[in-house]
Image: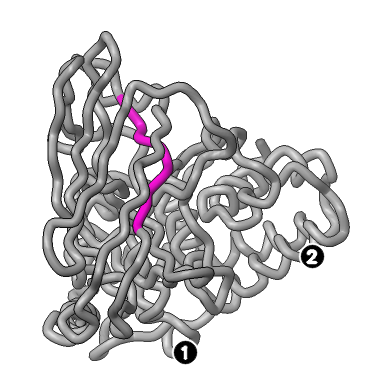
Amino acid sequence: MKFVAGLIALAALASAAPGKAPTPLDIKLESAGNAEIKAVITNTGKSSLKIFKSGTILDNSAVEKVTITSGEHTVAFDGIRQRISTENLAEDAFQSIPAGESIEVTFDIAEAHDLSLGGKYDIQSAGAFSFAQYGSTQLVGSVPFETNKIEVDIDGEAASARRVAFHQKRTRIQSDCSGSKLSAIQTAVRNCASVAQLAQQAAASGSAAKITEYFKSSSSSVRSTVSGVFSRVASECGSTSGGSSSLYCSDVLGGCSSGVLAYTLPSGSLMAYCNLYFSALPSLSRTCHAQDQANTVIHESTHLSQVKGTQDYGGYGYNFIQSLSASQNLNHADTYALYANAIYVGC
């Protein structure tokens, strides 16, 4: 990780859930202009829903909202990946949809996908929304969804201009890791390196039951993959003047929506830490499955393409990782963060 302008400069959609399940959500996509998509979300159930917006198609930031294909080719996503707080969420992090009613949202797919070739593309989305009960902001479950598939005709030149504008935003913002934020992030990066080293050793030769608990296997190939990821995390966190990434303490790409602790732009090797990261998290927790500043850095570091290029699959926390397949766990950022926490704490 590199210091930027004399300051530390460093740092989160749902992919398809494993298996289809009944759902009260009906989501229809339609074209709303060049590289703009409108989603009509209808609650077809008998009860009102209070769904969590961050990291979904309701998020205003450039998170992964759809899958885009052209023939047999899938267009790579190169927007931001977040880590979401699972505790003490604010009411504005949620969207209420009464039973039988619909909401609409329009979003730009050109910012985080290279559509410069133009022409016809197929667009679809699948995943899950986390939800809370009315009167509470505690996440208690999730509802799956799968949209219709639509074909859109893209003006490649116009779409490319929007993508370039998004990726150049960071050049107009100063990093602001100073004072207490600078001290906190320096400590977090050091702790990241130490905890990642412990996790690397445990993954390579530690308890078979523990690595199976998080990655659903203790095979030599799984051990090699997991220990390799933690080795690269430890290396990345082991330097504040070198490494692959740049770390920021300001919201350089507008990704700090309500409940977001931090986010990564893998294509730009950029990590950004939100105000909530500094105000809500302890430096290093001794509680099993807790979020802290150090394991958030681990989470974000695994998103870097140079480390693993992990995804979030629309979910966070210990209960969610148990719902993933073994292959998804190996590519899920929070699985690595939670395993590292378990090794450090002794869960």
Judged from this view, the residue extending furthest toward the top is 46
- Is residue 274 inside the magenta stretch? no
Q: Nearer the viewer, residue 253 or 79?
A: 79
The residue shown at (16%, 26%) is: 96
Q: Mark 2 — residue?
A: 224
- What residue type is disc 2 on? Ser
Q: Give how far across and how far down residue 288 sits, in percent.
A: 56, 35
Please give left or right for residue 205 compared with residue 339 in the image: right
Q: Nearer the viewer, residue 1 or 55?
A: 55
**Which residues are the magenta region?**
123-131
Which one is earlier in the sequence, the residue at label 2 or at label 1?
Answer: 2
| Disc 2 versus disc 1: nearer the observer | 2
Please give left or right for residue 330 compared with residue 290 in the image: right
- Dot label at residue 242: 1
Q: Nearer the viewer, residue 328 or 235?
A: 328
Mark 2 is surrounded, within 10 Å at the Cα level, by few (under 14), some (14 to 19) or many (20 or more) other residues, namely: some
- If the image is split into quadrants, where does the N terminus sit? bottom left
- Is residue 126 inside the magenta stretch? yes
